[in-house]
Image (cartoon, rainbow, N blue to C red):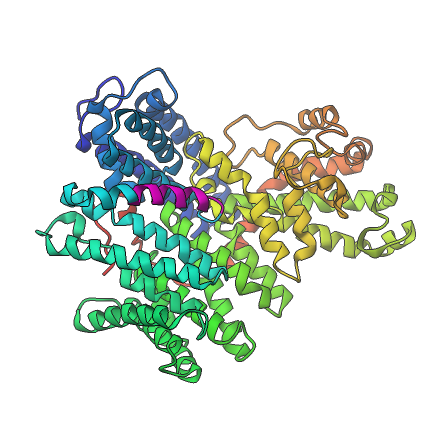
Amino acid sequence: MQEESHGFYSREEWTQFFTDYNTEIWKLNDTSYKLVQSDLSAEDWIEEYMKNSAAIREAYRKNEEMLDRHVRCFTRGKERWTRQVADPLISFMFRYITRIQDLGTACELAQSLLEFYEGLGDDVAVMKCLLARAFCCDFLDGIHLEDQVKEDCARASIIYEREFLRLTPEEQSMGLSIYDLEFDRLSNRLKLGDISPALIEDMVEIHRVSQKALDYVVAVDQGYEFNLILPDFDYYLGFCALCLSPGECTQEQCAAILEAARRRQETSEKETGHSECYRVRTGLVYHMAMRLSRLISDKEVMDGLHELMDQSFISVLFTEGGTFSQHSLEAMEGIELAVENITHRGKTDEELFDRTLRLFTEYFFDRAYTTFVDYVCGTCSYCYIQTALPHARDKEMLLNSLLKLTMFRQVQTAIHSYMVGYLAVDILESMTEHKPELLIGQLGTHSVEEVRERKKDFLVFLYQGALLHDIGKLLCSSVINAQSHRLGDLEFQVLRFHPQTGGEMLQNLPQLSMFRDIALGHQKSFDGKSGYPADFDNTVSPIKIFIDIITICDSLDAATDHLGRNYTRAKDFDTVMKELRAGRDTRYSGAVTDLLDEDIPLQKKVRKLLGDGRRDVYFNVHKKILEETRHPELKSTHDWMFNLYVASPDK
């Protein structure tokens, strides 16, 4: 490959550049995933973990040099785009945006190129930039960035439809992804219970327009490689039936949904080579569409769901396609949504509902690490947590499911949360002994004596709150799991959503809603004048003392981590204490800081935990995650996502 001083001058060179970059990310992700699944001794596992952390730091350094030279020189530096560099780059991004693993860099490029092409008045290139940016936003956090995705898709679709007959066959084919994203956005709203005839009408109209474009693409196809995988718009519209009940949409809308589902079912029956999961997800959508049109009864659908939940298909569900299968994932999500719908969230068949909750958690818990898989797992799990999990009757199962779907998919977050939990318990034990008056009023106490009598209740409450404080990182797994580059503005924005996401989930779970303020407030300063989210006032929270403890423990662990992915030099305890004192009563609680300063036995316990004790916590968290992984080692089938020269194997 001939390299210029900055960037490249052909699509082939840009493709190779990002393939090489993807390969580096794949190596890190694969090593991290295998390390989680490994059954090594404590010493060996810690040694391998430290090696992996060192490898990530080295990759970070190399990737920064590479990105500075070929990308940021244009997006942040003095270099200016030229068509010789920009045209092949946006052509590459338009073709492969769903396979780029570094979404932050991809979004930064799309934004910079958008400004360049808007200045030139090149509408087709603008369309490509808008689609690329929309994909990045959707994959990073399609829930909280929905408005941006909607705006970009609306602008892109106007250009696509106006220029359609003048586009190249590849542009016509890849432009179908605009409607793919729109269906995804609206489907998320359906899954979250935002059901209205107007929303369904939007989906019916998008289906009409997108299917017309798809039919044209198929009609003029000459065996193009880019047409090997095309959007399944009939399935997307039929998907609505999984979330709807009779009477929730118009008769015309029911008819459109049923017709789309029927076409997909009939095609599935005629074609050969499809997987079992593909046939299940297609058949399930068809039967739910018939139920929506009152052509079959709830009992008939329920009987079919009971048959699906037998052990033979469950084995297929977990093993078909190895570490990743789009159709397996769609089958699992379809089963969960259908059961949630048909049982009225457990009111009519509690056993089936509970079995499905457990199955969903087990399935999504140990999927492989890629940006696409993280996006799908995060979005599906978020919707499930918001709508189905609130109806779980067993608090222990609820808490376990929540932790497995959130922090246990991010090993570093899991380790950090347990470290914060242990630190918080140490501080609270000292507080109940030396400053119990700070806790009066919490958990219904009215005196120092009551606080000390209920010490165990206080410890359990704070420990559980610590484990849950970062669960909002569910929607930014691709940022957490692949820290192989300096984060961009969009990635930082997504990370800053995590207290809000955590608060949203906990508020919606009646048995855990008491921890909402801990998730919302742990990134705010003690005085409430800085930190995020801006619209949450932690200073008036009834559990502010617990937020204050978690905030300090959060900082103590993050600053002193000498084993994990820490790109700055780890600080010692004394250095962090100086920072706590400097931020006393502004950034950090003065009362908690003073307690740490004055209680020498507490200091010794904290120093030990942050030092050698950290190794035990790391390994014990690994063992806990390993114990929860109940399925045999799966064949690695997600590697194709990193290789831009290989198509998806899903049929």
Residue 209 position, x and y percent, is 26, 55
Horizontal side of residue 564 vs 267, given as left or right: right
Q: Quadrant of the C terminus?
A: bottom left
Residue 55 position, x and y percent, is 41, 33
Residue 245 position, x and y percent, is 45, 73
The residue lying at 44 percent from left, 59 percent from top is 364
The residue lying at 47 percent from left, 63 percent from top is 195
152 and 517: which one is in front? 152
Q: Magenta includes 151? A: yes
Q: Magenta includes 206? A: no
The residue lying at 58 percent from left, 49 percent from top is 502
Residue 630 shows up from this direction: no
Dominant secondary structure of the residues highlighted in magenta in the image: helix
Give the answer, above or below, for where 232 lies relative to 32.
below
48 and 275: which one is in front? 275
| Residue stretch in magenta | 144-157
